[in-house]
Image: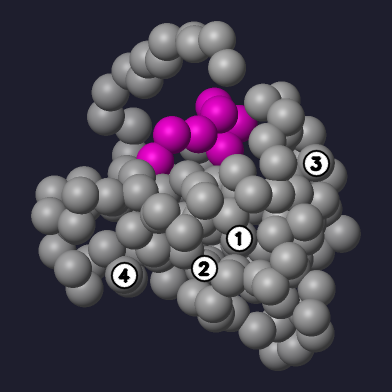
Amino acid sequence: MDTICFTNEPPKDFGQLLSLYESLGWNSLNLSSDDLKQMCNQSWYAIYAFKDQKLVGMGRIISDGVITGIICGLCVLPSYQSKGIGKEMLNRMIEHCEQNRVIPQLLCTENLEPYYESFGFRKFTVGMTRNIIR
């Protein structure tokens, strides 16, 4: 992982993030690279992982900056998974929340619960969503 650069500086080309999302099957809303750029730029905190100039991971937090920070979009390119990249980004996001006295929270699929529990997260509520027409 010593060749991975972690930064808060966004990629010059958000097409890289679009490719990352699509590699994970995360673009069911047919977001554009401009949508992803706006999403990241309007986040309270975002972290990016690069291998050379290639975006290989990203995570972000949406927050009021006072009480709660919702960790979302934590992702790593499939060929770079299980190398500690997601772990490093998550630790940095948690640290950013703690430094600002903001409670980190997240939503995840059931199969990821043990992963997040290993970072000290615990299940506390039932999540709900409402579909909209986009």
- Estimate how packed mark 4 is, as few (under 14), some (14 to 19) or many (20 or more) residues with alpha carbons within 10 Å: some
Give the alpha-carbon distance from disc 3 to disc 2, as whole Å. Answer: 19 Å
Question: What residue is pinned by disc 4?
Answer: 96
Which label belongs to residue 47?
Answer: 2
Q: Tags 3 and 1 in contact by the CB under 8 Å rule? A: no
Give the alpha-carbon distance from disc 4 to disc 2, as whole Å. Answer: 11 Å
- Estimate how packed mark 1 is, as few (under 14), some (14 to 19) or many (20 or more) residues with alpha carbons within 10 Å: many
Q: Quadrant of the N terminus?
A: bottom right
- Magenta stretch: includes residue 107: yes
- Magenta stretch: includes residue 113: no
Give the alpha-carbon distance from disc 3 to disc 1, as whole Å. Answer: 13 Å
Which badge, 3 or 1, comes first in the chain's sequence?
Answer: 3
Locate residue 55 relative to residue 129 in the image: left or right. right
Q: Secondary structure at mark 2?
A: strand
Which is more foreground, mark 4 or mark 2? 2
Q: Secondary structure at mark 4?
A: helix
Where does residue 107 sit, x and y in percent of width and height? 43, 34
Q: Nearer the viewer, residue 75 or 46?
A: 46
> Disc 3 residue type?
Glu
